[in-house]
Image: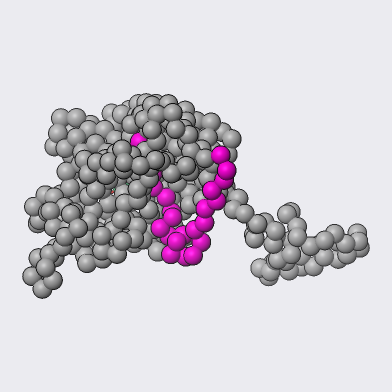
Amino acid sequence: MDGTASPGSNDQRRLLEALYADMRPHSLYPLWEVMAALVTPVPRSAAQPHRWHYGPARDYLLRAGDLISAEQAERRVLILENPGLLGSSAVVPSLYAGLQLILPGEIAPCHRHTQSALRFVLEGDGAYTAIDGERAVMRPFDLILTPNWQWHDHGNETGQPMIWLDGLDIPTVRFYEASFAERLDHPAQAEAIPADDSLRRYGRNLRPFRGSAADRRPAGQPMFHYPYAEWRESLLGLAAAEAPDPHLGHALEFVNPADGGSVMPTIAAQVRHLPAGFETAPRRATDGAVFVVVEGRGTALVDGQEFSLSERDLVVVPSWSELRLSATAPLTLFGFSDKAAQEKLGLWREARLPA
Ligand code: 1HN
């Protein structure tokens, strides 16, 4: 036991143990025996740093594609389960990550749930996610959101497999015991709104004139598609114009234009760019994060464990682990984390350490 109380005599110990044994059937437990483990001076994550190479994960996913349809599976996904959190379907204690495959002609049937999701496209071009009646056409490295309780289905009318990274707040919703879900009685929802309508309406810092009855998305969450073509231009433009932050490299956060905050209440998303030869100074932060390589090569040093990274490899960086990133070729990363929820709860912190 990870005790807090200072040791006493053998006699005291014996009497205490007898007390504990008597109390146990009454659901009572002494705080002083566990307090140090509950209130740690710094975070101690149960999650482990881990890297998944894309190639082997993709092979297993395609093998699953031969064995079960998207419709039969409802979602054909390989969970990126943290080796420190086995059995929990979690990549960090608050978040879930997975790799999803949709083959040509398939539909992942329409449903909605209180879990919020993001998709980050890794392979294929031109499949769609439909969200509350509107399709977003998925192109490589686009970010697409499925906010809490919005109807969504995915379909692939192209000739190629589509693979993307799913990030959901499943463990957070489980923690609060607030899961609700429904299925639509049709596999695909009706296309009520033209494809990419929300990008035209909200994607360039504009919104429908108030009172014009043209608002088609929820006022607090108007955007659900952040195309690669746009975020790449912003990130690489920044990289061309200024020196990288020593601890982050060039870094941009995706925002919800309605309030300037994170893309969803529980999940924050970011992109980073490191010029070739650049190495970040070490940094810790309380958010548990998942990164995927968009382009380039490098390494992630996470609490002293070194992971080589190449295109589409994934790495999980648990809370308060010390991260150093380095680029052997210009390195672009996408990441998502629970920073959004932690900031709302007043918990998020970082420590920028000397190089
Ligand atoms: C879900 O709805 C999707 O819509 C993916 O693509 C993964 C994992 C658990 C629960 C719901 C999707 C999911 C999921």
Q: Is 240 drawn above or below residue 63 in the view shown?
A: below
Image position, residue 55 (x, y; %): 37, 26
Image position, residue 256 (x, y; %): 28, 58
Image position, residue 176 (x, y; %): 45, 63
Residues in magenta, as a range? 332-355
Q: Is 120 drawn above or below residue 177 in the view shown?
A: above
Where is the N terminus found, in terms of image quarters?
bottom right
Would residue 295 be visible to someone looking at this image?
Answer: yes
Residue placed most toward the observer, 86 or 97: 97
Number of disc labels = 0
Colour option used? one colour
Where is the C terminus found, in terms of image quarters?
top right
Residue 182 location, quadrant: bottom left
Is 20 on the left-hand or right-hand side of 250? right
Q: Which residue corresponds to the image point at 31% horizontal and 61% vertical from the top-left? A: 260
Q: Which residue corresponds to the image point at 48% horizontal and 49% vertical from the top-left? A: 288
Q: Is 112 drawn above or below residue 276 in the view shown?
A: below
Residue placed most toward the observer, 147 or 226: 226
Indicate whether residue 308 is drawn in magenta: no
